Image (cartoon, rainbow, N blue to C red):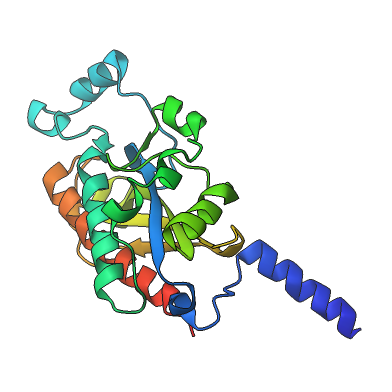
Amino acid sequence: MMQKVGIILVLMCVLTGCVTMEGGLSNYEPAAVVSIVSNKMINWEGEETRIDGIGDRFVRNSLFSKQTADKVTQTAADDLIEEAAAILYDTLSFSGIAKIAAPSDVLETPAYLRAETNTRAEASGDYLKPAAYKFLNNADKELAVNLAREEGIRSTIYLDLTFCKAMANGIGKNGSMRAKIIMKVTLLDETGKKIYFRTHEYVSVNRIQVVSAAFDNEELKGLFREALYEAASGLVSIMNTK
């Protein structure tokens, strides 16, 4: 009976991404953030990507006034990904929970430069990354091993972000909306073993008005910055697990 319970617990850990960081990230320092990626186009929560083509624009402009129609459009994350990298790294680094290698000390190393690129993500055009980073495969153990051997890095962090537009209240696309970030965190130790793998969700506390799916893009980006700080604080809590 005990053996069966043990097997069930192991399976639950595999499926849910159990934390095995004994003592938190401090036992795996110095650590390095080696990958940050996000979706390019920010969709409504639960909706698939749509292409805002000529037909879409015609329907949109037919249904709404010119002032409103200009606001009913897809939101791109291009302006957010560099900010995301800075906010996540700075918050994690300044938290004091562990030594975090500066990006310039990792991203220009021979080990990182020869790391295998995720060509599928790179070619799809659906994803973004900060300019200094590469599209990487978090299943590639070689980077972790090489960074440990050549640079003394004891753990590597991969952050996969999904930006979503989420209704807070109202009917349809009328009411108030919030920014939502789904963050998948992957942590590998110096041998390339995956010691943390779990997805977390964060939303902005503040909201903005949305009318017939129309909203102010700049206001929405402000909400995403707020959600990014929430995600960064969440990342510190995750990595400070005792």
Q: Quadrant of the N terminus?
A: bottom right
Residue in the image at 26% along x and 36% along y:
76
Residue nearest the observer in this picture, 214 or 200: 200
Residue nearest the observer in this picture, 36 or 116: 116
**In the rendered image, which quarter is residue 10 located in?**
bottom right
The correct choice, above or below, for 231 with respect to 84 in the image is below
Considering every residue shown, the one lying at the far front of the view is: 150
**In the rendered image, which quarter is residue 233 located in?**
bottom left
Considering every residue shown, the one lying at the far left of the view is: 67
Residue nearest the observer in this picture, 43 or 182: 182
Considering every residue shown, the one lying at the far top of the view is: 54
x, y percentage for residue 136? 47, 42
x, y percentage for residue 89? 28, 61
Numbered marks: total: 0
Q: Name the side, left or right, on which 44 lies relative to 157.
A: left
Whether residue 216 is visible to the viewer of this picture, yes or no, is: no
The correct choice, above or below, for 53 with respect to 151 in the image is above
Residue in the image at 34% along x and 67% along y:
100
x, y percentage for residue 48? 44, 36
Whether residue 76 is visible to the viewer of this picture, yes or no, is: yes
The correct choice, above or below, for 234 with respect to 151 in the image is below
x, y percentage for residue 44? 35, 44
**In the rendered image, which quarter is residue 97 located in?**
bottom left
Q: Name the side, left or right, on which 85 lies relative to 134.
A: left
Residue nearest the observer in this picture, 75 or 90: 90
Residue in the image at 19% along x and 22% along y:
61
Residue in the image at 62% along x and 65% along y:
16
